[in-house]
Amino acid sequence: MAGTTHTVSNQPPSLTGYDVYGTDRVLTEAVDRHVSPDLQEEIHGELSALGRASGSAQVQEWGAQANDNPPRLRTHDRHGHRVDEVEFHPAWHRVLGKGVAAGLTAAWARPAGHVRRAAAFLVWTQVEAGNLCPLSMTHAAVPALRTDPDLAATWEPRLTSMVYDRELRPARLKAGALFGMGMTEKQGGSDVRANTTAAAPLAEDGTYALTGHKWFCSAPMSDGFLVLAKAPEGLTCFLVPRVLEDGSRNVFLLQRLKDKLGNRSNASAEVEFDGTWARRVGEEGRGVRTIIDMVAATRLDCVLGSAGLMRQAVAQAVHHCTYREAFDGRLIDKPLMRNVLADLALESEAATTLALRLAAACDDGSEQERALLRLAVPAAKYWVTKRCAPVVVEAAECLGGNGYVEESGLPRLVRESPLNSIWEGAGNVQALDVLRALRREPTALNAYLQEVGRARGADHRLDQAIKNLLTDLADLDGIEARARRLTERLALVLQGSLLVRFAPPEVADAFCASRLGGDAGAAFGTLPHTLNLKSVVNRARPTN
């Protein structure tokens, strides 16, 4: 009789053994929308293979192991020699290796490369977000290196390789390479112009010795790093290789690893340069200009990463409520829970739709699309990353007490959820960058208005929101203090216009009513009850 108390009932099955990509209707539709028909079969097959791996119990376990066994700093070997290495759990290498093999650093080398990579990035985030840092840094380094054809010739084939080569060797001996970055310093943070790391020219043209301290160095076991330092002509971008051409280690002194809220599997370090050899990238004194495209790429990855976290949180919440019964019925059929789930699903769909639209603009590369990115990327980075944390926390609440237990996986998502809002420029930096684009680049606003204008006339709430936005843009009094409000509206109007054009009517209707029409409360689950919320929730359900 005692054994009957341990009978398990009314507990949902684990969300494993499914195709993370193929069951995400919003993502699969976006890929179809943005790639040519002749590539769709190839790309869907590639992404479904990654989606099945991502949803497998084995790969999910690797992600959990990598998170549960964070990296360890080893400054010296047993003989007292300085080695400055970071040791990772084997699961980290398995996950990172599959990410490289899936093309997450290969966008620049393949047709429709940015869209297919964006979709893969969103999917792979749902395994373990920590490994996305070196993948993102490596991807983003390519446009900066292209300012120097010689450097690009050496490094780009290795950075865009789909081979994970973890050994520290000179670049010429590597089948694939990863990059990290060191931009911020303790006294400056986001204000990189306050950097004090000094770059002294060496005898060989274009080479320098760096002296200074970097407060955050991403992915310290990478093969190379892009860093900012002050040369005689001003702030300049440099490439710091981990291993020099003769096989000796560069001076790269790891002081400590950051003890972070989330992102535990990934190493973020403080690093000291003391006569460290570096090669100039771009013109001396033009460091910020050299890294501008790199910054845009990493910011878009922040949007994608947040969209991926939201998608996984919503999928877990909908899955749980599909199976969990309470008060004489399934949770998913209860009107109030359905309202919550639909509200979360709207936020997730809007984030994914916007992120893939921006990735498609990167593939297009026209002046019109580049102008759109100049304004839309910081606006999206500001808004989507800020929506991530409340979405994930609310999704965890849908699981009740189960969502507060580590085994559910939701606490890991909760700890990860604020990260993308902070990294690559926090909220104020993004809002001020939006103002900078509006003031200095009129083509950016024109491109934005043309984009949202494609949906004019389809929904009266969207039309009114566009009019209100134009009124805000015409009033420059106190504009800096209103920058966050303006940036939020830019992002919401763009999301609304995309959903009106491409999402099912019930999704667009619910978004415009709640996000643009003001017919919702401050918390999730306050959508108008007259909307078709059942269809919105069903669209977000992962098939197990």
Image: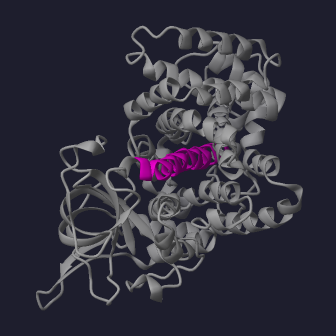
| Residue 430, percent from left and from top | 44, 34
Going 70% across and 17% down the picture, which residue do you hit?
Answer: 513
The image quadrant that residue 491 belongs to is top right
Q: Quadrant of the C terminus?
A: bottom right
Give the left or right position of residue 7, taking residue 31 as reference. Answer: left
Give the left or right position of residue 391, taking residue 291 as reference. Answer: right
407 or 189: which is nearer to us? 189
Q: Start and end of the magenta stretch? A: 289-318
Q: Is residue 521 above or below residue 330?
A: above
Going 76% across and 51% down the picture, which residue do you hit?
Answer: 31
Q: Looking at the image, what colour scheme do you see?
A: one colour
304 or 438: which is nearer to us? 438
Res. 61 in view: yes
Magenta: main secondary structure equals helix
Give the left or right position of residue 17, taking residue 185 as reference. Answer: right
Going 35% across and 73% down the picture, which residue do you hit?
Answer: 221
